[in-house]
Image (cartoon, coloured by chain):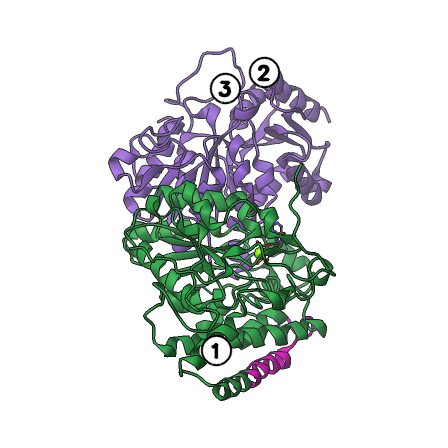
Chain colours: A purple, B green
Amino acid sequence: MSLVHALNSALDVMMERDPDVLIFGEDVGFFGGVFRVTDGLQEKHGRHRCFDTPLSEGGIIATGIGMAAEGLRPVAEIQFADYILPAYDQLVSEAARLRYRSNNDFQAPITVRAPYGGGIFGGQTHSQSPEAIFAHVTGLKTVIPSNPYDAKGLLISAIECDDPVIFLEPKRLYNGPFDGHYDKPLEPWSEQYGSDVPAGYYSVPLGKAQIIRSGSEATVLAYGTMVHVAQAGIKESGVDAELIDLRSIVPLDISTVEESVKKTGRCLILHEASKFAGFGAELSALITERCFYHLLAPTQRVAGWDIPYPHAFEWDYFPSPARVVTALQSLAAH
Amino acid sequence: MHVPEPKTRPGDSPDFSEIELLKFAPVAKPEISEPSENLRQLPFHLVRTLTDDDVAEGDWIPGLSASVYRKALEYMTITRVFDEKLLRIQRQGKTSFFLTSRGEEALGVVPSLALRDGDMCFPTYRQVGWLIARDYPLLKLVNQIFNNREDPLAGKQLPVLYSAKEFGFYSLSGNVGTRFGHSVGWAMAKAYRGKPDIAIGFIGDGSTAEGAFHEALTFASVYNAPVILGVTNNQWAISTFSGIASSEHTTIAAKGIAYGIPGIRVDGNDVLAVFSVLDWAAERARAGFGATLIEFFTYRAGAHSSSDDPKRYRPAEEPTSWPLGDPIDRLKNYLIKAGEWSADQHEKMTKAIHSSVSESIKEAEAIGVLGKSKPPVASMFDGVFSEPDWRNVEQLKELGI
Ligand SMILES: Cc1ncc(C[n+]2csc(CCOP(=O)(O)OP(=O)(O)O)c2C)c(N)n1
Ligand SMILES: [Mg+2]
């Protein structure tokens, strides 16, 4: 099953199980979403449960918070993560703070899905990775799957979670894995790790990282598309690295990270988002705080350059397996 | 370039001559089923029932008994006395911040009495009257204002930003306007469930310039949400007069027209008219006719908050010159003239209110004023998420608790 189908299945399963689950966003109803994630849901579950909204991200999230406070389980789609900013105030000042400021009187269990990341020639405004601006906000959970199995199980957990969850979908992975070798033909998800997706209900807990590959010389931390780039880079580097797919950055599975880095003594952090003040900075600080006396080398980051996402230079910007190789080999040399 | 400027500033005498609607003029009351396109003149009038001679006239007289008005009078008076006393308490340094609803007491109290249990109010910070009119314990309000160990919000929130779900009162926040759209979402949820409950959202005149206002109207209109969208137009947004919020060229109620939502402007200091307009809008919502935008035309008679001094930007006599008077005085005079109340009764009631409010304040003071008593520090880590995150668990330890 592809990642798109897995997400669709998660929504379908949850709509079937729970009449409180409503799905809405721009073009998600009749049309089924620009990436087809909500395909067929309106037809199957009716117009009251899966519907189009005005083109108003602030309005979508404000309305969703009101529904969630009332007791529904809204799942709102923001068409591209790049366009979530008009709703940022609602997410930060309202969704994230409602429980705390009301001392548990109200809660906002809304799930906000948004395709993020590059690799599709989307230019500046269809390629960004804004996870760090959500990770910084106490009260929001931020989840980023890397394969169909996790995508479905994590989305189900997000919908069931009593807290607001930002669910970032690596759009480059929607229809097949992508390891950064952009000149290779697209492989479908079938046969790939994580593409065996049960048809029914199951969940993957939020805040549990997954060790994709165990290794002894270095720890690689990644999420979303970069998990696949990491796999390619590790293979090509010849370094025996342990790869951890964080799966959610809030909550962060710090014990898995800590245990691995203490074991390997070296850490490489990957993300597509720009490097400066990216989520990698937080990971690096945590590792210094917790694993300093086990470290054999300075922690490294391979990330997007500190520039807006440049259309013509997609592959110069996108962190490549080659950069992973260089970083791993220099780490291992320590 | 034109920059709107109020007609008068400190040192001038107040001038309200530009507000032409202040004269009593009957406004026909439409059927709730009247399509919005036939109601496009409504937002340019001002619905009143109480004339300048303290009698009720016209289509909008609500069919309520005098006992309801006496209740409203009592709750508005409690609100005013509560505000006066707590402002003094703030001045004495017993809390950090306070804010009153002076002159606008009807806008908290009347919606609270007009709407039902099961309906949800998304208030502004100037509507504590909603809670007071539902007999929310004053002691709990003061405990919140003191952030003491009995504070229902456990010290997490600025004074007066209450939350009381059980009383139909949504959590307040310091950000203006951000909950306006929540009222629409809440109402849509009720409609989805097929329940008769409705929501009422409020926003200040200044805050109607926020995107959140327009987004809420868009969604309310598109989904025909059973919601009442209320604007408390008290003429001021801190030091900024309502002309800057774009009402120099139109009324705020008229902003409903473009959304196909009926807009009504009502004298917010006329308790009978406020009851009546709310009833009309609530009935419309419950009958499936959708949202109504109500502009409650009133005047902020007090300072913006305890941190504000209005004498620096408006004539000192403005608050006492508001042509539409004071909501408490007008209701009192109406009831007395109607033979349903007396000056003597009023004095007795006010006296009793003074002592009961003082009593609650004393009780709260005995628990502790701000800084003298507070909830356990550990509680500041509670409620960030539904379950504690390891960061907070570790930080709690780091604090040594
Ligand atoms: C989003 C936001 N911007 C600015 C402020 C600062 N502020 C607090 S109250 C206020 C004026 C609000 O005026 P209005 O909406 O008319 O409400 P009123 O205070 O008159 O009831 C401002 C600018 C705020 N609290 N929130
Ligand atoms: Mg105002």
Earlier in the chain: of badge 2 and badge 3, it is 3
Pick the residue in front: A30 or A74: A30
What residue would you read off at disc 1?
A: B332
Residues drawn in magenta? B354-376
Let me know if marks 2 and 1 both belong to one chain: no
Instruction: Determine whether the residue tagged by mark 2 lies in a helix, strand or loop.
Output: helix
* Residue A150 location, quadrant: top left
Question: Label 2 amino acid?
Answer: Trp
Q: Please tell me whether mark 2 or mark 1 is closer to you in this view.
A: 1
- Residue A77: percent from left, percent from top: 43, 36
Residue marked by disc 3: A120
The crowd level at tag 3 (other Cα within 10 Å; few <14, some 14-19, many 20+) is some
Residue A131: name its quadrant.
Answer: top right
Q: Is residue B242 visible?
A: yes
Q: Nearer the viewer, residue B16 or B246?
A: B16
Same chain for the residues under marks 2 and 3 in the image: yes
Three-letter code, disc 1:
Lys
Position of the C terminus of chain B by quadrant = bottom right
Q: Position of residue A281 (x, y in %)?
A: 67, 36
Horizontal relation, residue A244 to residue A28: left or right: right
Are dots 1 and 3 in contact, CB under 8 Å?
A: no
Chain letter behind tag 3: A
Check residue A315 in the rendering and tell me which mark sits there, or answer none: 2
* C-alpha gap between disc 1 and disc 3: 69 Å
The amino acid sitting under disc 3 is: Ile
- Residue B277 locus on image (x, y percent): 39, 60
Residue B252 is marked as none
- How far apart in space, not on screen, are marks 2 and 3 (Cα)? 10 Å
Residue A130, placed above or below residue B118 = above
| Residue B150 in view in this figure | no
In terms of depth relative to the viewer, which is nearer, A201 or A45? A45
* Percent x, y of residue A96: 53, 49
